[in-house]
Image: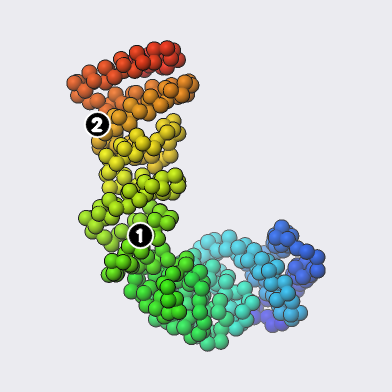
Amino acid sequence: MVNALFQGESERYQEVEQDVIHTYKFITSSRYVTNRHLEQISIDAKNRISRIKTDQSWQYVLTYMRGVFSLSTRANTYDEYERRFSYFFQAMIEDLLTLHDSLQEDVSNYRLFLEHVLFLVAYDADNVKAPWSQLLFRIVVDMKTEHVESVYTFLSKSIDTASCSRALALTYSYVSLLAGKEVTALSILTKKGARYQEQEVNQHFQLLKERSRWRTIKQWLTVLFSHKTKGHYGSLQPIIDEMNTALPSPKNEQESIWNRWMLSPNYQRFLNYTQHLTTEEQYELVERLLPLLEQRLDHLETAKTYEKLLLTYKKYEHAMRYFLKYEREPLRQRPEKEELLHALCKHAPVLARPVYHQFIVRLVEKKSRVHYEQAARFLRTLQTLYSSPEEQVLFREYVTRLKKKYRTYRAFVEELKQIDL
């Protein structure tokens, strides 16, 4: 390692130097290396570190990473074995992240940890291959709020946004957003003069979305993606669609949002997109969407979304028709269907009756003990849907007809006797 940045780092490196060299040689070996081999390299490095008696294992992990990275830089081998080095550093970062929550509990130790990471970030600020920006980004995503300002202050004093690496610019920008510096965050990205991929700034836009900063999102789109003439934003599209539902937008844009939503219906995104609509507008939209969804009920997520909409907007007549037309296996129902059926029984028992009539017949026709047992349970439920004395008479007549129709189904008749019917 070229220079020691921290007190005791030279001594720590001497402890692990032979291990670091071993790992480096393994990574740069000429033989073919699979992901399984790379995993073994990472596990071996972690095991070597774990044998060191210390309460500050994170210091040795950072020293180990820096040692391997320094060797790759000095020998100019990083580019040749980029996939291998990237895999190794990612594995070591994941190892550090497992310590992150416990580290935050000890404030003084956590500050020391952050100081080490930040100094490494600053030292290799312009090195596009350095793993520290990625490490810092992963840390700040789950960092407690009280530490954000100090990280932002350090970066603002130490980093030249014009010359720093692209990865560091993205991390610095995200930290600025966390600190509430939206203008600075955007300025950091634009100073690089580069076009960003949607996935690179997904976390930035997600944070703005969580804070309902819709106009800021619109501004960022204009600045960062002015080259997108067709307006397709890849992984950012759901956020953009939600922005367009929150801000005034032309009718044709609203239609485009729901046309895209129909390509992959999802209930949570429906909630996100409709939270800014009035109740009346929501009901009008649901009336328009339900027939379209019904055409695609063979897709599981579409069916779940359809069921949740029927439940949320109390479309009980639709629910009755849905069960009668599409439910072929009443013995095995998903939680969404069970919830909808329960609501139908509770709020519209008259509409639930034909559903149970059909369920019972379909179960009995299966001619197996397990289906007979479920049919008997459904009969008990059906009985509760006939509440008044007059309705109970109707129920008894129904049971009589059922027994007569299936009198040769002895096992089923026995099940009815078990429940006193």
**Residue at image mark 1:** 258
Please tell me whether residue 121 is drawn above or below residue 270 in the rendered image: below
**Percent x, y of residue 367:** 47, 21
**Kind of residue at badge 1:** Trp
Locate the N terminus by quadrant.
bottom right
Relative to residue 359, is residue 38 drawn left or right? right
Location of residue 165 by image quarter = bottom right
Per the model, the C-alpha gap separating discs 2 and 1 is: 34 Å
Residue 282, visible in the rendered structure: yes
**Percent x, y of residue 109:** 55, 69
Residue 322 vs residue 75, the one in the foreground = 322
Residue 205 vs residue 198, the one in the foreground = 198
Looking at the image, do the residues carrying marks 2 and 1 touch, with CB atoms under 8 Å apart?
no
**Kind of residue at badge 2:** Val
Please tell me whether residue 59 is drawn above or below residue 181 in the rendered image: above
Task: Residue at 30% x, 15% y: name it.
Answer: 400
**Residue at image mark 2:** 350
Residue 67, visible in the rendered structure: no
Relative to residue 272, is residue 36 drawn left or right? right
Task: Residue at 43% x, 23% y: name it.
Answer: 365
Residue 202 vs residue 11, the one in the foreground = 202
